[in-house]
């Protein structure tokens, strides 16, 4: 962890270093850094996929919420608007799809109308609404329902996901949808369904990229999966094997995202 921390300090920007400080010691970031992290939000509450974009993206909004979560900012007005926007975007069947206006620019995992992309987006949106439901600063006083203020939305999403799982725990979508779904179902007390996914994930950990393993570990730890859970033990072992000599982990999306991957690894190993 010391080497990973050093990598973020050396290569991260001001927001990255603020995320690190919050992860390490709970230090609140400066208000101006929060303003930077929240910049570019559309009037309806989401964030666009591109700096000059005008249409909010489910995928981009979830990515931004991950950064704000590291900064302890899920309770601020920007994140609240984004979470409410996500909840309002849920489809009648409990799932999510990107806006059709993004069809020409969306990556394959967010392509409007594609069932695999829809499964991934549903798992991602439901995960962040779940995380907000665990955080009283974001959701207000938590009520008795699983998921708090977004309980009904996340419950419908969980049923949407469960209906599409295969009996062996595999899922009809991208790899990341697996750990996101497992996290959502774990918090919905659908432990058997979540466990089947985790078994399928554990069998693949040894072949996963560092970025995927870091994301898996960070996601499951965020919803309270115990650190001694066997899929997390395997994930930490894989991270140990793939950490570079400079302390960082390699991103699947280019070296400009190595700091993001390293922060995810730090989250997953806390």
Image (spheres, rainbow, N blue to C red):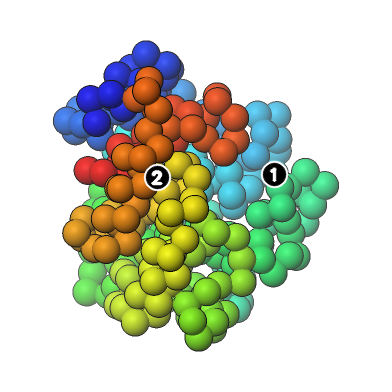
Disc on res. 87:
none
Looking at the image, which residue sits at the far right?
104
Left or right of 176 on screen, residue 77: left
Please name the residue shown 67% across and 54% down the image: 110
Measured from the top left, where is residue 77 in percent x and y? 39, 41
Disc 1 to disc 2, C-alpha distance: 29 Å
Measured from the top left, where is residue 9 in percent x and y? 33, 17
In which image quadrant can residue 21 be found?
top left
Viewport quadrant of the C terminus? top left
Measured from the top left, where is residue 52 in percent x and y? 70, 29
Please name the residue shown 70% across and 38% down the image: 54
Crowd tier of the residue under label 2, counting other residues whose Cα lies within 10 Å: few below 14, some 14–19, many 20 or above: many
Note whether residue 30 is visible. no
Disc on res. 214:
2
Note whether residue 157 is visible. yes
On the image, numbered disc 1 is attached to which residue? 55
Q: Is residue 140 above or below residue 151?
A: above
Tell me which numbered mark, 1 or 2, is placed earlier along the sequence: 1
Please name the residue shown 49% across and 32% down the image: 250
Left or right of 21 on screen, residue 160: right
Q: Is residue 165 above or below residue 210?
A: below
Please name the residue shown 42% across and 49% down the image: 213
Viewport quadrant of the N terminus? top left
* Label 1 SS: loop
């Amino acid at each position: 962890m010391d080497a990973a921390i050093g990598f973020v300090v050396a290569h991260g920007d001001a927001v990255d270093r603020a995320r690190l400080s919050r992860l390490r010691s709970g230090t609140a970031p400066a208000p101006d850094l929060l303003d930077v992290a929240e910049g570019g939000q559309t009037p309806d509450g989401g964030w666009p996929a591109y700096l000059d974009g005008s249409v909010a993206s489910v995928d981009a909004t979830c990515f931004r919420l991950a950064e704000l979560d590291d900064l302890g900012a899920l309770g601020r007005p920007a994140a609240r608007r984004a979470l409410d926007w996500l909840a309002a975007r849920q489809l009648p069947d409990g799932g999510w799809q990107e806006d059709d206006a993004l069809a020409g620019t969306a990556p394959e995992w967010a392509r409007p109308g594609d069932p695999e992309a829809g499964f991934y987006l549903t798992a991602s949106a439901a995960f962040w609404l779940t995380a907000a439901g665990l955080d009283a600063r974001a959701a207000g006083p938590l009520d008795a329902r699983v998921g708090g203020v977004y309980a009904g939305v996340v419950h419908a999403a969980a049923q949407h996901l469960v209906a599409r799982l295969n009996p062996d725990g595999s899922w009809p979508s991208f790899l990341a949808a697996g750990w996101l779904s497992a996290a959502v179902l774990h918090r919905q007390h659908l432990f058997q369904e979540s466990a089947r996914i985790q078994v399928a994930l554990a069998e693949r950990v040894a072949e996963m990229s560092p970025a995927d393993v870091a994301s898996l570990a960070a996601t499951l730890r965020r919803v309270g999966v115990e650190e001694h859970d066997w899929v997390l033990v395997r994930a930490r072992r894989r991270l140990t094997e793939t950490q570079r000599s400079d302390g960082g982990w390699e991103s699947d999306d280019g070296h400009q995202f190595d700091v993001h991957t390293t922060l995810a690894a730090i989250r997953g190993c806390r």
